[in-house]
């Protein structure tokens, strides 16, 4: 029954070109009933073939009434009716990093460094895959061996901007995800960027703003974050620089001021655990070569990390890796 509902929702999403209000108004009892009410007007759409297209691309469609639909998206104003996911969207602590596409070299380095350090502390980085601050944040998270999620203003079969296609594939391969509420082939409109931003903020504990001019999509993300009871934290800059006009306005309105990852972790009450200190705990504890191999893998991968990932990195079978982790826990090295 659920598969049928997904199949018909996807067909409706294509037919109405992902128009949120029209799709929401169409549903009465089920997505199947909704499709039957309009299908004669769209004879060119084959629901089965369209669903097979996303399935073959490794894309998962989750409806808003399913158990694995992200809870924080259910709690937001005008929540998505469904989301498409390619990769793994894990329910772990996440922070959004957003800002202008026309970022300065300094802002680009800052976004990358903050994302990298947050990632090394086990934080998942959320952004929008755009040029500038977004791509720097995603890249920093990857450098920190962490997970990052890109929320797109397009369908997952139409990666935007195309220049960041390679980055989008790295995100998936690293254990992160691409997310969209738009149908597979959807092309971007101005409104879809704003629509995307509400999901970026909703998936996060806080929105970090780096270089937001007076007119910036990052400011829309900040407004959504406020509506969703998320924290808004802003990196300040030169008083007369146009890239910081919107940023400084947010600070005047009460947003928190931060300059580095440790400020962010402190403001959010998150403990900053550096993976590099992991081996400090084993100086006076006897460990086997296999235990050392597993610890080295965790140190390199960053945490949280799945047993499957540890097994893949160490070439140790999952069952054996679980056993080693259990011994390390008994010894008080892991928790």
Image (cartoon, grey):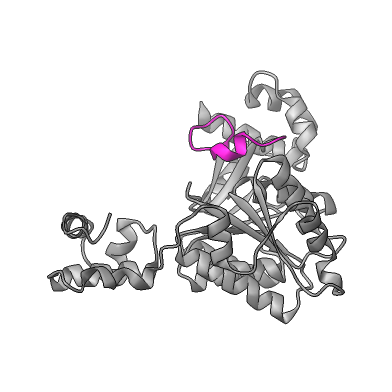
- The image quarter containing residue 259 is bottom right
- Is residue 169 visible in the rendered structure shown here? no
State the residue lying farthest toward the top: 29
Q: Is residue 11 above or below residue 319?
A: above
State the residue lying farthest toward the bottom: 105
- Is residue 94 visible in the rendered structure shown here? yes
Of 107 and 90, the residue lying toward us: 107
Q: Determine the residue positioned at 76% across, 55% down.
A: 187
The main secondary structure of the magenta stretch is loop
- The image quarter containing residue 63 is top right
Q: Is residue 27 above or below residue 244?
A: above
Q: Determine the residue positioned at 78% across, 39% down.
A: 19
The residue stretch that appears in magenta: 63-77
Of 312 and 115, the residue lying toward us: 115
Q: Position of residue 179 (x, y in %)?
A: 60, 51
Q: Position of residue 248 (x, y in %)?
A: 80, 62
Question: Residue 97 vs residue 304: left or right?
Answer: right
Residue 67 colored in magenta in the image? yes
Tag count: 0
Q: Is residue 246 above or below residue 72?
A: below
Of 14 and 39, the residue lying toward us: 14
Q: Determine the residue positioned at 53% across, 47% down.
A: 55
Q: Position of residue 247 (x, y in %)?
A: 78, 62
Q: Split into 4 quadrants, where in the image is the C terminus?
A: bottom left
Q: Determine the residue positioned at 40% across, 66% down.
A: 302
Question: Residue 289 vs residue 271: left or right?
Answer: left
Residue 298 colored in magenta in the image? no
């Amino acid at each position: 029954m659920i598969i049928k509902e997904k199949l018909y929702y996807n067909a409706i999403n294509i037919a109405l070109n992902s128009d949120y209000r029209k799709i929401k108004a169409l549903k009465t009892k089920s997505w199947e009933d909704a499709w039957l009410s309009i299908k004669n007007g769209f004879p060119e759409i084959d629901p089965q073939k369209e669903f097979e297209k996303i399935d073959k691309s490794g894309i998962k469609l989750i409806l808003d009434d399913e158990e694995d639909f992200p809870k924080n998206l259910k709690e937001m104003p005008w929540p998505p009716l469904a989301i498409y996911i390619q990769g793994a969207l894990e329910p772990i602590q996440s922070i959004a990093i957003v800002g202008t596409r026309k970022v300065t070299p300094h802002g680009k380095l800052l976004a990358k460094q903050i994302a990298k350090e947050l990632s090394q502390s086990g934080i998942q980085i959320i952004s929008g895959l755009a040029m500038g601050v977004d791509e720097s944040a995603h890249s920093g998270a990857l450098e920190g061996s962490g997970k990052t999620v890109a929320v797109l203003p397009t369908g997952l079969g139409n990666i935007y901007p195309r220049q960041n296609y390679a980055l989008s594939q790295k995100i998936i391969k690293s254990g992160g995800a691409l997310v969209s509420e738009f149908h597979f082939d959807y092309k971007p409109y101005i409104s879809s960027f704003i629509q995307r931003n509400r999901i970026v903020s909703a998936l996060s504990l806080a929105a970090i703003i780096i270089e937001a001019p007076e007119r910036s999509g990052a400011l829309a993300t900040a407004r959504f974050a406020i509506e969703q009871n998320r924290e808004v934290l802003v990196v300040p800059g030169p008083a007369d620089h146009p890239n910081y006009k919107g940023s400084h306005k947010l600070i005047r309105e009460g947003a928190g001021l931060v300059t580095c990852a440790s400020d962010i972790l402190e403001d959010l009450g998150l403990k900053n655990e550096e993976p590099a200190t992991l081996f400090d705990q084993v100086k006076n504890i006897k460990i086997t070569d296999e235990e050392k191999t597993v610890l080295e893998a965790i140190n390199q991968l960053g945490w949280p990390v799945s047993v499957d990932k540890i097994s893949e990195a160490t070439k140790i079978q999952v069952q054996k890796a679980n056993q080693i982790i259990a011994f390390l826990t008994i010894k008080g090295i892991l928790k």
